[in-house]
Amino acid sequence: MIQIENQAQLDRLKQEQNALLVLFGGENCGVCQTIKPQIVAKYSEKFPNLKMVYIDCEVLQEVCAQYGVFSLPVVQVFFMGQKFIEEVRGFSLLALEQKIEQVFTKMNR
């Protein structure tokens, strides 16, 4: 999972990648730090074309605010630069996986 350093880097990845998962978290967010390795472990193998990035909202507050992230954790999944999925705070990684799979299935028809 790539650590995003600035808005331009995120914008570039949204344009370059067909599928991009963005985890908005914080170093002091216990849930964020717990799900981060779980997301990588669960989704890397199942979705090899899904690029995964992490934004530390304690460092990049303006980027998080621009994406409407005011509580943590938040996962946003972009396909072809458009946001298709957003999960906020208490969410199931299995349900998120199923939503990602649905979009990939529709895109590959």
Image (cartoon, rainbow, N blue to C red):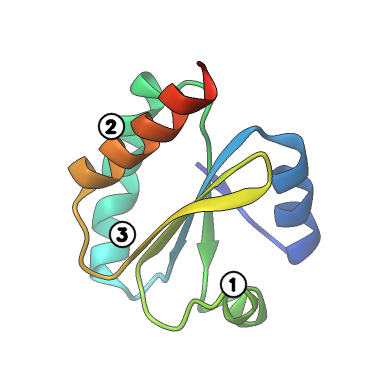
Amino acid type at circle 2 is Lys
User: On the picture, is 13 further left or further right than 78?
Assistant: right
**Badge 3 is on which residue?**
33
* Nearer to us: label 3 or label 1: 1
Q: Residues within 10 Å of mark 2 (few under 14, many from 20)?
A: few
Give the structural element (helix, strand or loop) at label 3: helix
* N-term-proximal mark, 1 vs 2: 2
Q: Within 10 Å of the Cα at label 1, are there few (<14), some (14-19), or many (20+) other Cα atoms?
A: few
**In the picture shown, does residue 74 fall above or below 69?**
above
Which of 108 and 71 lies nearest the eye of the viewer? Answer: 108
**Residue, disc 1:** 67
- Secondary structure beneath dot 1 equals loop
Give coordinates of residue 83: x percent, y percent.
Answer: 56, 54
**Pair 1/2: label in front:** 1
Residue 66 coordinates in the image, percent (x, y): 65, 77
Task: Choose the circle earlier in sequence order: 3 or 1.
Answer: 3
Of pointers 2 and 3, the one earlier in the residue sequence: 3
Q: Nearer the viewer, residue 73 or 107?
A: 107
> Which residue lies under the disc numbered 2?
42
Q: Tell me the SS state at disc 2.
A: helix
Q: Amino acid at mark 3?
A: Gln
In contact (CB < 8 Å): disc 2 and disc 3: no
Label 1 and label 2: CA atoms lie apart by 25 Å
